[in-house]
Each structure stands twice: as structure tokens, then as C-alpha cells.
Amino acid sequence: MYLYQHEFLPKDELRISSDDRGYYFGDGIYEVFRVYNGMLFEPAGHYERLERSARDVRISLPYSIDRLDGLLRQLIELNKLSEGIVYMQITRGAAERTHAFPKQAEPILTAYCSELARPLQALEHGIAAVTADDIRWLRCDLKTLNLLPNVMAKQAALDQGAQDVIFHRSGTVTECSSSNIMIVKDGELRTHPANHLILHGITRAVVLRLAAELHIPAKEEAFTLDDLNNADEVFLSSTTMEITPIVSIDRKPVGSGAPGPVTRKLQSAFEHLIG
Ligand code: PDD
């Protein structure tokens, strides 16, 4: 079952307007929530980010957060989802194509859930990444539907035999195509500050919280491609990929070429958290 506008419907009964501004302009925002044991993981962080995305792109949310939370929980129940994700998007509405905001249109909410296993193979062995220019706009902190640069870069990485891309702006590392990135050097964690150049990942915040609990020093400070190449450990963080080690970058091994001890510590604390 999908949640579309104000109804729960089977997927093939959805009637989506071809005038939805999501199609014309990517004019909308979204969230991806993790579901563990039938429960939303870190929902407050997602709702807070959703509210900020909505405010800054000037889309009004169709429901209060309380009501939305109730609907998403109902969606999970209706679909009997235990392990997976909830995807939710809100577009500015459906109207004849003009760039200016339409006067009449109501925001359109679509949400569904799907089963998704934890990425156990990647968590255990790590993945290969390649670096690429970050050619995105300057509001990467907003979770909008405009993902073409991310999509292009991800595919280019796959075409090169890697699993993901690490973006940099003139040598300053920002994040990956759909995750944040952290490095470890001499036992210290480092990640790009949560400003307009990266998405403020919910998993990133969880990792920083776990690092504090584990007394792992952490700095939210930008780092360069040189720092990346000289790091002892590198990992990415996201709702779907959790804490995934990056074991090679541009075909060169990271550290020993295997997931490192700080990454492992954080992974096991994360595992404990999701129970
Ligand atoms: N992506 N950076 C980007 C560009 C992202 O798209 C995401 C999430 C993250 C990590 O954020 P979080 O920890 O809140 O998932 C960072 C989602 C999973 C997606 O688009 O599928």
C-alpha cells in the first residue's frame, strides 16, 4: 500500500498527474527513513530535516509532524514491514508548467515502504570508491528531488568498477552521492561541517553521538583529497548503508586495505543501537 495524498492505496491504483511539478522541475523534497523491527529509526531527526527542507524551498507540509508520523506508522503496519525503508516525497503540486510557483496547487505527498535488508556484505568487507568533482548547487543541505548530479556521479563510479563516488569541491571533500563521509587519522574522526555543502545526515549525527559516547575524538572540519588519501580509515554513513567502510579510493587501498578498528567500534555500537 502507498500513502498518496490523503489515502492509502495499492500501487496500481495511484493516479499521478503528469503536471506534478516533481516531473517538470524536480520541485519537491523527500526523506528516506530506516525501519528496524517495524519501527522508524531516529524519526525526530528526519522530521526536523523535512521541516527545514520544506521551509527553505517554501513548500508547506500537508500535515503536522504528529499526524504525518501517525500516517507513516500506519503505512508500516499496513505493509507489515519489519526491515526496510519508508520513502516519502512532497512536491509543490500539480499545475500547468511555468517556473513560478502556481497559485492554486496543493502540495502532493507520496509515501511507500519497501523491504530492504541491511547491506551486510558491504558492512563486512567495505566498498571501493572513486573521487569526482562536486558539481551540485550550493544548497546540498536541502533534501530535494533534484538529484541528477548525484545520479550521474553514482553511475560513473559504477562504470569504473567502484560502488560509490566521493565528491570534492576544488580538493575539499564534501560527501558521497547518497551518504556522508568520515575519515580517521591517528585515532581521530573528521567529517565535513554540517553547512550548505552537504546533507546533514541523520546517520552522520548518530555516528558523532556514538563517537562521543565511545570517547573517540571527532572534529567537524573540512578535509582535503590529500587528507583522504592519507587517512587510516574511511567510511560512509547513510540510512540505507549504515556505517560502510571504504577500503579503496581511486584504485588505491585505504590504510591496510581492510576496515579499520575505529570503523569496527562504531559499527558495533550502531548495531547495538538498532538492537
Ligand atoms: N540519502 N548525503 C546525501 C547526498 C544523501 O542523499 C544522503 C541520504 C546522505 C545521508 O543522510 P542520512 O544519514 O540521513 O540517510 C548524505 C538517502 C538515503 C537516499 O537518497 O536514498
Image: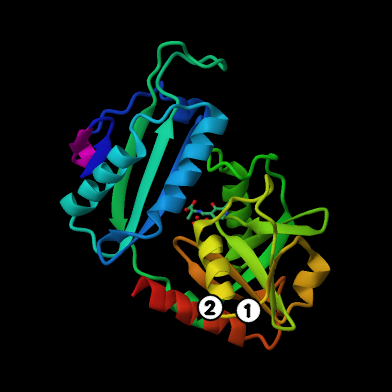
Q: Position of residue 210 (x, y in %)?
A: 53, 73
Towards the viewer: 242 or 268:
268
Task: Please give the label number shown on residue 95.
Answer: none
Determine whether 59 is above or below 130 in the image: above
SS for dot 2 = helix
Towards the viewer: 134 or 12:
134
Is label 2 within 8 A of ligand 1 (CB to nearest ligand atom)? no
Determine contact: label 1, label 2, CB under 8 Å: yes
SS for dot 1 = loop
Give the extent of the magenta segment.
7-13
Separation of residues labelled 1 and 2 (CA atoms): 9 Å
Q: Using the rendered view, name the quadrant where residue 209 is placed.
A: bottom right
**Which residue type does callout 2 highlight?**
Leu
**Which residue type does callout 1 highlight?**
Ile
Q: Is residue 141 left or right of residue 171?
A: left
Binning the other alpha carbons within 10 Å of mark 2 as few (below 14), some (14 to 19) or many (20 upward) gives some
| Residue at image location 24% in from the left, 64% down from the top | 82
Task: Please give the label number shown on residue 216.
Answer: 1
